[in-house]
Image: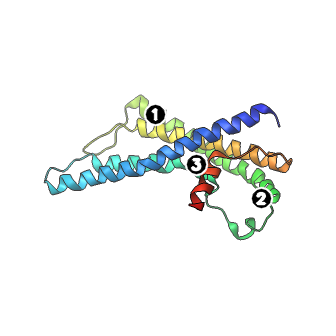
Amino acid sequence: MHPALIRYVRVVETVNYRTGRFAMYLLFVMMAILLWSSATKILKVPAIWTLELAQFTLVAYYLLGAPYSLQLGSNVRMDLLYARLSARSRAGWDVFTVFCLLFYLGVMLWGSVESTVYSFEVGERNPTAWRPYLWPLKLVICLAFVLMILQAIAHLIRDWAILRGIDLGPNPAASQHADAEVL
């Protein structure tokens, strides 16, 4: 397999591994925001920004964690038949289905880029009392779709290598995930 493809897989998986690990901590950020919201309500000085910021944090947590989830293989799939297949047969099936995923992600990226550009151009704000700008959140959504597309392509390269009988070495997230399961 061409060294540039192997390098691509390693770089993308490293970036998505680190991004996914960062996204895991956004759950604690969201919890802190909601705790602050509860505290300000008890003190009778409610903060108008907490619910929306918690929602925005949840969107970032969910979408930035998606490429990491795909990398780990913890995405949802129909295991009724898939789990019974050999590793090579699963790789063949994944090579076929990744194109459906890439089409879907391409459409989602296209829509999110258009929405982000529009939001930035008109200074779109959420129609609430806090009125935050929406383009930063939409930019995170675009970034998440780009990372997901890059991870899907890395997944395709790994599966293609399996079909050709080539071992690309350990996946940084999968090896860490396996260590965590043992503990």
Whether residue 94 is visible here, answered yes or no, is yes
Q: Nearer the viewer, residue 144 or 117?
A: 144
| Dot label at residue 68 | 3
Q: Which residue is mark 1?
A: 118
Q: Which residue is mark 2?
A: 90
**Nearer-N-terminus badge (1/3):** 3
Q: Residues within 10 Å of mark 2 (few under 14, many from 20)?
A: some
Of badges 1 and 2, nearer the viewer stands 2
Figure quadrant of residue 105: top right
Judged from this view, the residue extending furthest toward the top is: 121
Assign a secondary structure to mark 1: helix
**In the image, what residue occupies the spot 67% across and 50% down?**
101
What amino acid type is highlighted by mark number 3?
Tyr
Q: Residues within 10 Å of mark 3 (few under 14, many from 20)?
A: many
What amino acid type is highlighted by mark number 1?
Tyr
Q: Nearer the viewer, residue 8 or 111?
A: 8
**In the image, what residue occupies the spot 53% across and 42% down?**
19
Figure quadrant of residue 2: top right
Assign a secondary structure to mark 3: helix
Say which quadrant the N terminus sits in: top right
